[in-house]
């Protein structure tokens, strides 16, 4: 794990398009520079080409043992507050009862390990890791009044914390509960696939620490990537497909109870 | 460090969660201030639409409330952005909405809709309507008010018949633009909620229309309250023709509003999508008081029945003939109940939309803080503030028919000294 040397996903992994876009143009007009003063802090290595990537994640609930290491690693890596109200990723436990309905819990988001079910009459249980679905058609990006949250060219939805107003419309618009308001910066936060790691050629920290490889990360469009193999070899489902958000977190053999 | 009180508050909320909610949903994001915001803009739109009735459709009876309605709309519009600003995590960045708006965002349009309505519609209409009086007041008065009125004329002191005719036609033209603008203002606020597909409580094409009609209801009811109270304070006989007409309009609007809300309700119930279970649970528990009791029974049905029985709404006759004094009291009571009802409507939309989990498996609670920018006192302050602004506006621009300046002598151009 390389979280000691990784800086926080520094300000918006910048909008990668070249040229004079609307924001830069207005930034030049108002501030005499491209973007508001504090926003200019790129953390992308010069040799990183966002257009060459299209990231996605596969999740295999059948492999998840609910150890919660992904949740803890994510909190450490990304400076997520430790209190149990702020998560970039969390693990849900589903207990399917004899009568057919499922009881869902996620004590402290699964950090420290998901505890044993307390219900009796449980037919089966399984765990589902959740995170931002990095939608190809993201409602959070659509609603952001100033474009502080945006889709990068490599397919990751990011938040420019130096630009975010803290209006929380994106939190309302996310169907997956994947966003929170950082209580310290007062800006919206979410999973970035550990973007600061991606640009260095590393995988997201939750993927790295998972002891059972329940999370598979990689290029969605490369035929020979582990992710493509995962997508070929499993029955794939996404969360809430009826909302047409086109998630890029793909679940293998997902139970119908999972929302 | 996160403040201990904040952690404590969220811990308490967590204890009261029923079923399962996503862990990020424990912190409820849009609180009292976002309830106040659509309530205030609704009053603006409603008061303006009432004023337009007199102007465009020549409803003579409500003429005494024309200027009062306009000033009410202005006072509430001036305060309307405050709850939004106070709610932002970074209020200092709010200007970015104007500078670099995301044109695909419904919320980004707020600044433009607001500026259009304030600058192009309300201020212009009020200015054209008051210009003659401003000039005359500036000539006849003494002291600082005289200078203020002179400044407000913006130097346009021509009182020739041609100029006054221009004022009238300009005012009429602005009202014509103003009606769709008022519809836009509040329909737009409804769209902010109605377009959130992630939230089954909000996501409905009817929401902007329901918002609009509830806005009209609340605006007329507010003007009714202000009209009755101002007559009392000024020790003037209440113009009952006007009060009756207001009551009629209030009744028509509330019938329309209630029908739309029922349509929305029945439609949801009949479709019975996957969210129906959790929404039903929410209505019968968390929202029972604010929705069933306050919004529907006390805030809609009761005043609707009262108005239907005593206002001369059908062929200028009431079902029950009631003496004027009692009628006034009932109008006043109905209007106050309607305000409570409409505030509850806003509450039920904004807070209700966040009390159930998007996992559709659990319910949470809203724990309002007392202090702080998003607390009870701040919210109450923002509900009182428009009345203070209105009081000041009423002092500067008295809307009463008896305060209207008379054009006595041949006017001469110039400042206050040119009387």
Image (cartoon, grey):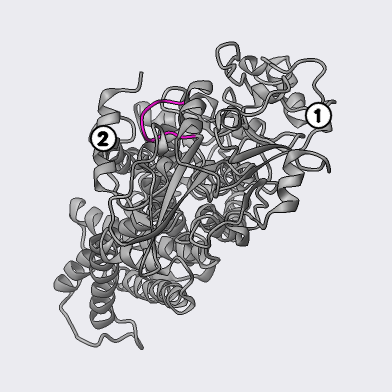
- At x 50%, y 54%, the residue is B193
Label 1 neighbour load within 10 Å: few <14, some 14-19, many 20+:
few
Quadrant in which residue B159 is drawn? top right
- Quarter holding the N terminus of chain B? top left
Can you identify the residue that label 2 sits on? B9
Q: Secondary structure at mark 2?
A: helix
Of A41 and B335, nearer the camera is A41
Distance (Cα) linking label 1 and label 2: 43 Å
Of B240 and A104, nearer the camera is A104
Which residues are the magenta region? A79-87
Q: Give yes or no for residue A80 being in the magenta stretch.
A: yes
- At x 44%, y 46%, the residue is A92
Q: Is residue A212 left or right of residue B270?
A: right
Q: Secondary structure at mark 1?
A: loop
Chain for numbered disc 2: B
Q: Position of residue B262 (x, y in %)?
A: 40, 76
Main secondary structure found in the magenta portion: loop
Q: Is residue B46 visible?
A: yes
Chain for numbered disc 1: A
Of B182 and B128, nearer the camera is B182
Q: Position of residue A142 (x, y in %)?
A: 64, 45
The disc label shown at residue A101, or none: none
- At x 29%, y 46%, the residue is B366
Quadrant in which residue B93 is drawn? top right
Can you identify the residue that label 1 sits on? A17
Q: Position of residue B78 (x, y in %)?
A: 44, 40
- In the displayed structure, B305 sits above or below A243; it is below
- In the displayed structure, A90 sits above or below A31; it is below
């Amino acid at each position: 794990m390389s979280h000691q040397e990784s800086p926080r996903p520094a300000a918006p992994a910048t909008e990668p398009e070249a040229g004079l876009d609307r924001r830069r143009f207005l930034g030049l007009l108002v501030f005499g520079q491209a973007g508001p003063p504090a926003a200019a802090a790129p953390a992308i290595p010069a040799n990183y080409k966002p257009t060459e990537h299209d990231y996605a994640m596969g999740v295999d609930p059948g492999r998840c043992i609910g150890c919660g290491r992904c949740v803890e690693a994510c909190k450490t890596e990304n400076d997520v507050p430790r209190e149990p109200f702020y998560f970039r990723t969390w693990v849900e436990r589903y207990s399917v009862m004899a009568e057919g309905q499922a009881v869902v819990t996620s004590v402290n988001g699964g950090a420290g390990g998901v505890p044993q079910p307390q219900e009796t009459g449980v037919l089966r249980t399984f765990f589902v890791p959740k995170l931002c679905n990095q939608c190809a058609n993201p409602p959070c990006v659509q609603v952001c009044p100033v474009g502080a949250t945006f889709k990068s060219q490599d397919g990751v939805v990011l938040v420019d914390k130096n630009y975010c107003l803290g209006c929380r419309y994106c939190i309302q618009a996310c169907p997956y509960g994947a966003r929170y308001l950082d209580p310290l910066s007062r800006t919206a936060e979410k999973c970035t696939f550990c973007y600061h790691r991606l640009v260095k050629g590393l995988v997201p920290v939750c993927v790295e620490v998972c002891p059972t490889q329940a999370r598979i990360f990689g290029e969605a469009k490369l035929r020979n990537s582990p992710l493509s193999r995962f997508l070929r070899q499993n029955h794939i489902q996404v969360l809430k497909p009826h909302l047409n958000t086109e998630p890029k977190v793909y679940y293998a053999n997902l139970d119908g109870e999972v929302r | 460090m996160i403040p201990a009180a904040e952690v404590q508050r969220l811990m308490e909320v967590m204890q009261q969660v029923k079923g399962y909610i996503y862990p990020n949903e424990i912190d409820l994001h849009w609180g009292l201030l976002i309830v106040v915001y659509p309530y205030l803009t609704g009053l603006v739109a409603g008061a303006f639409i009432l004023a337009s009735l007199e102007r465009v459709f020549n409803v003579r009876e409500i003429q005494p409330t024309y200027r009062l309605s306009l000033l009410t709309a202005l006072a509430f519009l001036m305060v309307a952005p405050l709850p939004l600003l106070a709610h932002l995590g970074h209020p200092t960045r709010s200007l970015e909405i104007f500078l670099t708006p995301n044109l695909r965002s419904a919320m980004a349009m707020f600044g433009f809709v607001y500026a259009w309505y304030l600058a192009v519609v309300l201020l212009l209409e009020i200015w054209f309507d008051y210009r003659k009086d401003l000039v005359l007041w500036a000539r006849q008065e003494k002291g600082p008010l005289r200078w203020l009125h002179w400044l407000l004329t913006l130097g346009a002191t021509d009182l020739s018949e041609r100029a006054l005719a221009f004022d009238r036609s300009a005012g009429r033209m602005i009202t014509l633009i103003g009606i769709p603008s008022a519809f836009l203002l509040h329909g737009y606020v409804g769209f902010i909620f109605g377009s959130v597909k992630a939230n089954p409580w909000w996501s409905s094409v009817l929401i902007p229309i329901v918002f609009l009609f509830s806005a009209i209801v609340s605006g007329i009811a507010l003007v009714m309250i202000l009209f009755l109270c101002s007559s009392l304070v000024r020790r003037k006989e209440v113009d009952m023709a006007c009060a009756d007409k207001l009551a009629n309009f209030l009744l028509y609007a509330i019938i329309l509003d209630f029908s739309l809300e029922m349509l929305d309700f029945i439609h949801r119930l009949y479709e019975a999508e996957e969210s129906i279970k959790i929404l039903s649970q929410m209505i019968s528990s968390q929202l029972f008081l604010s929705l069933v009791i306050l919004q529907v029974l006390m805030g809609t049905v009761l005043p609707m029945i009262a108005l239907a029985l005593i206002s001369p709404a059908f062929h200028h006759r009431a079902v029950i003939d009631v003496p004027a004094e009692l009628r006034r009291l009932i109008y006043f009571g109905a209007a106050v109940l309607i305000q409570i009802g409409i505030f509850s409507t806003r509450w039920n939309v904004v807070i209700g939309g966040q009390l159930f989990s998007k996992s559709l498996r659990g319910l949470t609670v809203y724990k309002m803080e007392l202090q702080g920018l998003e607390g009870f006192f701040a919210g109450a302050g923002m509900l009182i503030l428009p009345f203070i602004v209105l009081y000041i506006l009423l002092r500067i621009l008295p809307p009463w028919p008896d305060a209207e300046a008379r054009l006595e002598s041949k006017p001469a151009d110039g400042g206050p000294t040119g009387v």
